[in-house]
Image (cartoon, helix red, strand yellow):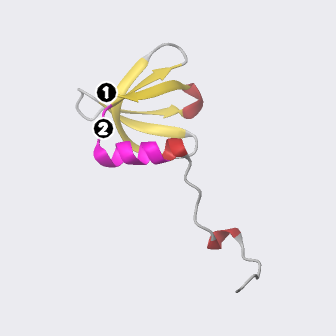
Amino acid sequence: MDLTARDSSDRMPIIHTHNAELIKFRDERKALVFTLINGETLEGFVRWFDEETVHLVIAGTERAETTIFHHAVVRYQVR
């Protein structure tokens, strides 16, 4: 059994639950409704996301897209 120390790049990346959900919704092209802290709602499809933001293709528009910060989102749900 090899017990030598390895650096963190040898480990599998940790995927948090909310990221796993976003990956699933992105891959399945599910429409999501995001409720923001100011009360506004945005409906769209996740194009990409990272640790701080989610990039949406707005539903019902031709090629309209927006990027929102995670800290601005109160909740999101599947449409």
Query: Residue 30, labelled with which disc?
Result: 2
- Label 2 sits on a secondary structure element that is loop
Q: Position of residue 38 (x, y in %)?
A: 53, 14
Q: Residue at x 40, y 28 (%)?
A: 77
Q: Position of residue 39 (x, y in %)?
A: 49, 13
Q: Residues within 10 Å of mark 1 (few under 14, many from 20)?
A: few
Decide whether the magenta segment is chiefly helix, strand or loop. Answer: helix
Does the magenta segment cover residue 29? yes
Q: How many marks?
A: 2
Taking the image as shown, residue 52 lies to the left or right of residue 22, namely right
**Which residue sits furthest top?**
39
Q: Nearer the viewer, residue 26 or 14?
A: 14
Query: Residue 41, labelled with which disc?
Result: none
Q: Which residue is mark 1?
A: 79
Taking the image as shown, residue 8 lies to the left or right of residue 33, namely right
Q: Residue at x 41, y 19 (%)?
A: 41
Q: Nearer the viewer, residue 65 or 35?
A: 35
Q: Position of residue 10 (x, y in %)?
A: 63, 73
Q: Position of residue 34 (x, y in %)?
A: 43, 25
Taking the image as shown, residue 2 lies to the left or right of residue 32, namely right
Q: Earlier in the sequence, mark 1 or mark 2?
A: 2
Region in magenta: 20-31
Q: Is residue 31 above or below residue 74?
A: below
Q: Nearer the viewer, residue 31 or 5?
A: 5
Q: Which quarter of the rendering shows the C terminus? A: top left
Asked if the residues shown at circle 1 and circle 2 are in contact, with their CB atoms under 8 angstroms apart, the answer is yes
Quadrant of residue 14 in the image? bottom right
**Which residue sits furthest bottom?**
1
